[in-house]
Structure formats: C-alpha cells, structure tokens
Image (cartoon, coloured by chain):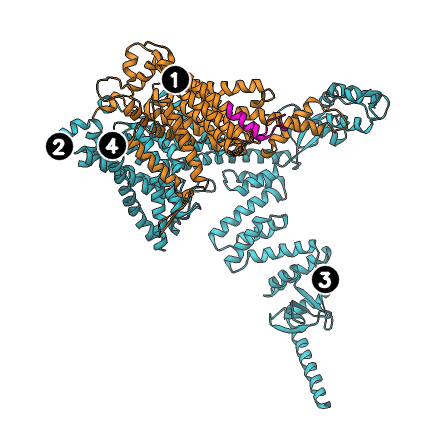
Amino acid sequence: MMFRLFCCALAIALSLGAARAQDSDAPLQSLLQANADAVANPSRSTVDGLVAALLASDLPGVPVFLERWRDRGVYLRSSDGLFYYATKAEGGYALVDVDTGQDAGQADSADITELRPNAGVRRVIGSALVAFQLLDDDPARRLAALDAIDRSPSEDQLEPLRLSIDEEPDPALKDRKIRLERLLSARFAETPAQRIAAIESLEGDLGVDARAVLNLILTTSPAVFAELPTDRNIAAVLEPGTEALSEDEAYARLVEAGFAPPLTGVATIKDALIAAMDGDAVAGIPVAGLSTDAAREAAYEALAATGAVPPLVTLDDQAAALAAHRFVLLYAEPDPAITAAAADTLEAIQFKVGLNQAADLALDGLSLASIYFLAAIGLAITFGVMGVINMAHGEFIMMGAYTGYVVQLFIPDYTLSLLLALPLAFAVTFAAGVAMERLVIRWLYHRPLETLLATFGISIALQQLAKNIFGTQARPLTSPDWLSGTLTFNEVVSISMIRVAIFVLALMFLGLLIYILKRTRLGLEVRAVTQNPGMAASMGINPDRINMLTFGLGSGIAGIAGVAIGLYAKVTSEMGADYIVQSFMTVVVGGVGNVWGTLAGATLIGFLQKGIEFLNPSNTLAAQTYMILFIILFIQFRPKGIIALKGRAAGD
Amino acid sequence: MSGSFIARNPSVLWFLLALSVFTVAVTLMSEVTGVGLISTSFVKTLGKTLCLCLIAIAMDVVWGYCGILSLGHFAFFGLGGYAIGMWLMYARTEIIVVQSLANAPLPPTDKEVTDAIATQIFGVVGSAEFPLIWAFSHSLALQLLMVVLVPGLLALVFGWLAFRSRVTGVYLSILTQAMTLALSLYLFQNDSGLRGNNGLSGLQNLPGLDAVPQSVISIAFFWASALALGLGYVLFAWIVSGKMGSVIRAIRDNESRVRFLGYHVESYKLFVFTVTAIVAAIAGALYYPQAGIINPAEIAPIASIYLAVWVAIGGRGRLYGAVIGAAFVSLLSSWFTGGSAPAVNLGFYTINWTDWWLVLLGLSFVAVTLFFPKGIGGLFDLIVLRPVPDRQGDYGPDKGAWRREEGEP
C-alpha cells in the first residue's frame, strides 16, 4: 500500500516536473512568462508593447497564439502559472501546449482561468493578426484575410495591408491588395491629399464596394439652422415644400430640434377636446356640434383661452417658422475638398455604371426577344404563312417541355437527356401538329374564326389532360452543369448561360427556317401554296401535303421552344397560356407571313418590355399592361405590322 | 318588310313567354313561397345564369350577326360588376363605420368617416386613401351611371381605334384579347385602386337591407335578371331586324361590298360593339351582387373565350341559341365541376368528372365547330321551317362568318 502510494506520488511529481521543465523553457512560453501580467490582464496601454515583442520574436507559434488569445481560447493554470490553449472536455478542460501544440493533459475548471481581452485589446490583436495573415505562406489564408478586410474595413488594417503589398508573390492577390489599399486609403489615409489621390484613383471602378466607399464618404445628415454656418461642410440647402423636403417633414425637423412648438393637428385637437370634455360640453360649447374641423378648432381656441391647453399652432405659424430657418444636409466628412473629390468621382462612376447597365439591359432584352422569337416563330409559320390561327400553340410549347421532363426521368445524365429531348420534343409536337391539321384544321381552312375556336377547344382539353397526367404542381427541367453558370463581362454586365443558349438556339432556327423557306423544294412549295393555293395545285403541288408539313413544322418548333423555355422556367400545364398572347402579339406586330417580321416583332417587344421594366422595376404587371397598350396603339399606325408584305404576296 | 315587329320575329314572343313561365315557376318553388323545392343558393345560380344568358345574347349580336369575334366582352361584364361593387362596398362599409364611430366621444367629422371607410376597404392592399376612381362611389345613382359609362366609353374608344384602322377578322379577335389581358393585368396590381387580386367582396350583403332574408333578395335579383334578359332580348331582336339588321348581317357576310354600297361600315360596327358592351356591363352589374365577389381573374381573356364557346354551342346567328348555349353549358359546367356528376368506372381507370370535364368540353367544342356549326339552336330548324335566304353561293349565316375572300379555294 505504502509502496503504491509512493509510486503514484513519484509518477505525478515526475510528470509535473517534466512538463514544467519543458514548458517554461520553451521559447514562446518563456516569452509569455516574461510578460505574464500583460498577457493575463491585457489593457490598451500594455498590449502594444506585448504584441510588438511577440512579433519581434519571430516565433512560429505566434500567429496561432494571437488568434487563440483574441478568440478567448488561452487559459492560465494557477497551479503552475503557465499559459495553455484549452478546450472544454469531459471532466474539465483539455490542455494544449502553446509551443508544441501537443496534448498537455487535463485540468480541472477550478484550476484554470480564461483570459478575456477586452474589445480594444482584441482589435489590436486582430490588426496584428491581419499583418500575419496577409503575409501567410498559404494563398488561401491570404485570400481569407482580404475577404475579412472587405467585409469589415477598419483604420488599423491599412498599415499592415500596405506593408504586405510588396511581399505579395501572387499577381491576382496583389491586384486585389492594391485595390483594397485604395479603398481603405480613401477613407482612412492620414492626410487629405492622400485621401483625395485615393478617391480619384477609384474613378472608373465598377465594383459595388468602390461605390459603397464613396457613398460612405458622402454620408449626409439633415440639420436645421437659423443662419447658415460657415464652418460646416454643407452638402445642400433644402427649400421646404420641394420634393426633397416636404413642408410637414421640414416642420417636424424644427420641432425635433426644439425650434418650434408642435403643430396642433386634427388628432391633437380631438384628444385635447376629449380630455377637456365636461359632461356634454367642452369649454361651454356643446359636443354635439363638434362634427366639423372648423367647429373643433374654434372649441380648441376657446379652451386655449382658458389656459388649459397650449395655444393653437396653425398653418400660418408653421409657414412663418419654416421661413425663419434654413434646412441643410451636412456631410459627416468635415473636409470639403474630400467630399468634392468623392462626389466628382462618384458621378463619373455612376455614368460608367449607367452605360454598363444599358448594355446589361440590352443583353436582357436580347435574351427575352430570343425567347419570344422561339415561342412565336412556330406560330408565325402556321398563322403567318398558312393564315391558320392556332390557339393550341401554347399547349404545343407545354408538350415539348413535358417531353423534356419525361426524358429526364429516364435518362439521368442531363446533357445526354437534353440532346435527346430536343429532337424528341420536335417529333412529338410534329406528330401532334400533323394529327391536328388532318383531323380538325383542314376542314376549317375557309373559316378562320372557327379555327380559332376549335383550336381553343383543343387547347383547354390538352391543358386539362396535362394536369390530369402530370398534376398541377410545377415540374423541374434541370439544365446540365455547363448551362447553369453565368457569363460575366464585368461587375454590372452579366447573363446566364441558359439565356445565351436560348439566343444561340433562336439564331439557329432563324437560319434553318430561312434556309428551308428560301432554298429548298419544300420551302418553294410552301411559298407557292401561301400565295395562291389554286395556282400552286395546278402546277402539280399537293396543297394538302404542304399544309400538313407546314403545320407540323410550326408545331415541332413550338416543341423545341418548350424545352428551351422549360429550362429556365418551371414546367406547368399553364406555361403555354403564358406565352400565347405574347406570341400572337409578336407575330402581329412583326408582320404576318414573314420570318423577318417575327424577328423584328420579337426584338421590339422584348426590348420594349425590358425597357419598361427598367423604368418601373417594382411592377412587372404594370410593365406588361403598358406594353400591351403600346401594341394596341402600334397596330393603329401599322396595321400590317413592321414588315408588311407588299404586292400580290400580301394576299389582298 | 311588312307586318309588325312581333309578327316578323315570332321567336321574341315565344322567348318572353318561356322566360316568364320559368321565372314564375322558379319563384313559386323557391323558399320565399314556403315550398322550398329550390334552395336559395340554386336560385342565385339561376339568377347568375340569366345574367350570363344576357351577355351571351350581346356576344351573339356582335359575333353571330356582325361577324366581330370579340374576346373582350367579359371585360365589359367585369367592369360593370366592379362599378356596382364599388358602391356596394362603400355603402356597406359606411354603415358599419358610422355605427362604430357613433360611440366615439366626439361626433365624427366627414373626413374621419371617409378615412375610416378607406382604411377598412384598402387595408388589405396596405393603403388608407381613396383613389381617384372611387370619387363617385358614395352615390348609387352616379355609380349606376358608371356601370354604363365606363364600359361604354372604353368600347367606344377601343372600337373607334380598331375599326378605323380596318383591323378585321382574326386580328381584331387578338386585339380584343390583348385589351382584356391588359385590363386584367392592370387590375391585378395592388395600386390599381381596386384592391388588386383581392377584388371586391361581400357584395351579396346589400347595404341597409340586413333585415331582409337572403331568400327574398335572391328572388328579387332573379326577377331583375329575368327582366334585364327579357328587355335585352327585345332590344337586340329589334336591332337585328329591319333595315339596320340587314346591314349588320351584310357586314358580316361581305364588309367590302357593304362599304362600296355606300354604308358607313365603321359606324355600324362601332354602334353594335358599344351597345353590346353596355348590355354586357349591365349583365355584370346584376351578376356580381349575386356572386358576392369579383376579382381580376374573372376578367382574364379565358372568360371571354368561354363566352364564345357558349354562343357557338348554342348556335350563332339566333338570339335564343345564345341563351340556350349559355344556360346549358354554364349549368352543365357547374354540375360537372361541382362534383355532383357520378364518376364513371372503366375498370382500369375511374373518370372523375372534376378532372375530365374540361377535356370533354374542349373536345365537344371541336365537334360542334366541325359537325354542327348551327349549334343546339339548329335543332329548332327541325321543328320550325326557318326561311333560308336565297343567296348566290354558299355564304351565309348558317356556315358561320364566311367572308367572300376566305371562301376562295
């Protein structure tokens, strides 16, 4: 028993002694021990010296220590007075040696104390850390440090950032550092000249953060003065009653600043009268008569005469008070030279941003135009070339999209399934179109209004059928990875790949259709039947066959458009109905019977819609309303569309 | 052109007779007389159906007689409903607000009352002020005037623009559809001033008539609808008979020839378009107090297309055909979609009519267009020998709106 106890005691003593000897000799620990008090109870006055000493020691463990210290991960063990990193573990804390990073045993929570540097100290530590991280060997850590600066820029980051620029080996990171340095300098550099230089160097920078920095410099706050001060950096003098400052707002500011008594409003009068009500009368005036504002005002004045309430402040008083004061916006930045430079630079940037936004808008318009073109081109063939109105065209678009969805159910590889879905959608809708032409439309060629109604019947039947088969919820049509990215030109101008693909698809179909109509036998026959079916028939062309093929072609293209549209919008049974009116508009505006006309119509409508949406971004419904109104008016002036057929080809 | 108006249009007399017998029969069987064979809600359905019949007649005149396939008449119907709905909602809210303000310590000023009404009505769209279009909503008389004026003016302006630039046929249909779409999209916005997609609701509660039971109100509306239908029928029968009727039908059959004969085609078309729009609006003003709620979805282009479906199935070019079509299809539609139609078990699949009714309707519509262009109304030709005008060629009302150039091979 005794022997065992002795052995135990010896072992503990040995291990403690060994640990102690190792720890206090280790360079970082000994450095910390030398400044034990400053480490354990850091303050703003001591921390600078300590951090400088730590940095000067050039020890490998310093950055980790600083990080842990800042994040409250360093503990002091009272039994031996050494510093450890500790994490909560079962039965106390697991200790880690500060030099070696090795496990240093366990400690009871009563035995150790967490070091809690205050916010000011942690900021100093953090900025020292930034210096370390910016010079780290690992580019990923340097990038992370730059991101951290980007997120929360502060004055003390500027110096380490400047020092790290020359050391930076990676050119991309170096560019980023230089840019960040300019952004920080614009706000925090020592002299106004430096700041102005930094601000002016931002000119032409399209980044959102550059504009954010300039806007921060240009931050203003409203203020009221009896006389305009000369020693303040005034951004603007506001006249009450203008759009920038309404009279009520201006007066509210006066009241807030204590320069004027609050206006006796309708509500105030009412409350005061209710409070002063004495039976059925207020100040001797019967309550029943107080059903107009004028009567209430009179009662209030009577009440004020007794001294029960403050005197009535009328609109005249308000106007007088407003005239006696000047309302200004003050820059938070006191130096006018800096704000002037920032304002100039911001204006230049805004102009450039405006140009780029216009380019972005043009891209959006182009992409919308190509979607409309794809949706409408099939209709342009059936409606324009054959004079048949097909209300079920939208449902062919839907059929194409559902075909794509079904193909994806069977083929999980998105690229392959897309490549398969396009021809399959064409085949399915081609067959549906031919069937519809054979069964319904050919009996109605001479009755266009009936065609409209019959195809509408088919449209509601197909829509309900799709609902019965696929359900009412939207089905996804997932695009392959190579289509899901974004093509980015700069910070402002970008477009998703899927829209680029739709644009390319629209161009392909434009080329294909022009080729078919102008260069092939089929196209020749189609054009002949379009112009004069009787004459074409007597030349040996079978108009029935041509009509069937034309209708099939138009429907097939609708199917392909369906796959394309399904890729960026959800596939629902109602998706066709969303496009049908726009498609008709496109064909009618463009000019019937002409592929180029459809292109012109789609371009006009696409750009117009995007333009209206840009002017009124919060309200896409209004944009559509105005666009349709525009189209109705447009047709007044060009009833035959943009590109009208002339001569015999016009048909009438 | 001899004989009195009635003698030349025997169908008017027959129709009025049938309508009055029907109205009296329904009234006798309703809950008002205590018989209760027909429930109040079904009386409302019948009253609404009569309103739909009225707009169907209007559609028949503009399409079946004048050859303008308007896909916008339901927009006028909805505008009429909105116009009357604004007064109903204002007046009812006013009563509630005045009651609640009566307990306030001070008697309310006019502005306080108006503000409280506005808060009540527009709270759902986050506004508390009356838009300008509600300026007349406090007055029933003015708002009834709006029922006629707003759709009438819209039809007049739109028709003048469209007919003046000689937009005809399919183009005109698409243009009217675009107008309808624009209007419904506009109304869907919250800041349109008509409560966005919430629409106007609670219209079945007539202001000041809380004490009157719904059974009485429903019969009153039923009678009003029947009266409107009867008057509308006589009005349109008068319009389409006589010289003007001949011109209108001639425009349908060959517009250019009528123009060359010296008639001002645009005026005739504009007259027909505007009058039918006004009648459609009156039908809407009677319909929505019975329906209780109106929202922009009711105005969507699809509704106007359904209207064309009713008229086509009932039979174009005869007024009673439109009535039969509207009544038949809308009642059948509510029977099928209401879930009261028995499901058909095919062994491998059970046909639920709520799912398949639209498919059936769509296909039967195709069938009617292809095989029975005269519609249900054509069955009457089997009973009564209808005088078929002796015309050159195949063109005429029975083949639908054929135009000469469309008839060329």
Where is residue B106? Give x, y as percent.
76, 25
Q: Is residue A572 visible?
A: no
Magenta-span inclusion, residue B270: no
Chain shown in orange: B
Chain letter of disc 4 in the image: A
Q: Which residue is mark 2?
A: A540
Q: Residue furthest right?
A: A306
Indicate which disc, 3 or 2, sits on the residue closer to the N terminus: 3
Q: Name the amino acid, label 2.
A: Gly
Where is residue B147? Give x, y as percent.
51, 21
Q: Is residue A80 visible?
A: yes
Indicate which disc, 3 or 4, sits on the residue closer to the N terminus: 3
Q: Residues within 10 Å of mark 4 (few under 14, many from 20)?
A: some
Q: Name the amino acid, label 1.
A: Ala
Q: Which residue is mark 4?
A: A443
Alpha carbon separation for disc pair 4 and 1: 32 Å
Q: Residues within 10 Å of mark 2 (few under 14, many from 20)?
A: few
Residues under numbered marks 3 and 1 in contact, where contact means CB atoms less than 8 Å apart: no
Q: Name the amino acid, label 4.
A: Trp
